[in-house]
Image (cartoon, helix red, strand yellow):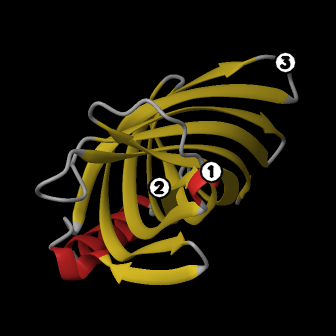
Amino acid sequence: MKKLVTLLVVALMALTASAQVTWNVKGGVGVASCIMEGEDEENEKFVGKIGFGIEVPFASDWSLMPSLEMAWKGAVWETPDFDYKETLNESYLQIPVLVAYRLNLNPRWNMTIKAGPYVALLLSAKDKIEFMGEEQEVDLSDLDANKIDVGIDIGVDFEYHRFVFGLEYELGFVSMLPDVDIKNSAVYFTAGYKF
């Protein structure tokens, strides 16, 4: 993963030699959940993300948007009748590479529709269980949790001058644990600035 990050930084530096390339920073808040086979109960958890990236135009109204982000994900399972609560806290370093199409709404506002894959490196995964007044925390890396997640990122941005407001949806394709089919899902409301 270190080689991948280094390669991305070198590629970003090479691409910024073009005058049309713009840098951006953004942050966001939202809700994450885990999708498990055979389970339909809600398990949303409040999460966030921060990051930076570039936008590289490659055709009229089309651009490539690679980024480097820190994203928090997870889920909460709760059964109040049994005084049970389980909280999964995950943090990832992720690299989405999105293709974007820009629509000029008027002289001040643009809308960008974007989609593409992401690759994420698991930095931390802790599962906290509270039952009958007792607490226990399990480090999922001790349970051979998958360190890499791969998924899709879909979103829409609205740009006003250099300010950007957006909505993003991420869906992971890789199960976190080898013996349980559990995948990440998250929706973020984001705000950022283009340089």
Residue drawn at x 75%, y 44% is 164
Residue in the foreground of this view, choosing between 79 and 65:
79
Residue drawn at x 54%, y 73% is 130
Instruction: Identify the residue position indicated by label 2 in the image.
Output: 18
On the picture, is 4 further left or further right than 127? left
CA separation, marks 2 and 1? 60 Å
- Quadrant of res 170: top left
Label 2 amino acid?
Ser
Residue in the foreground of this view, choosing between 191 and 169:
169
Mark 2 or 1, nearer chain start: 2
Residue in the foreground of this view, choosing between 187 and 25:
187
Label 3 amino acid?
Asn
CA separation, marks 3 and 1? 54 Å
Instruction: Identify the residue position indicated by label 1 in the image.
Output: 81
Label 1 SS: helix
Residue 84, horizontal then vertical, whole percent:
55, 61
Foreground label between 3 and 2:
3
Which mark, by number, is residue 106? Answer: 3
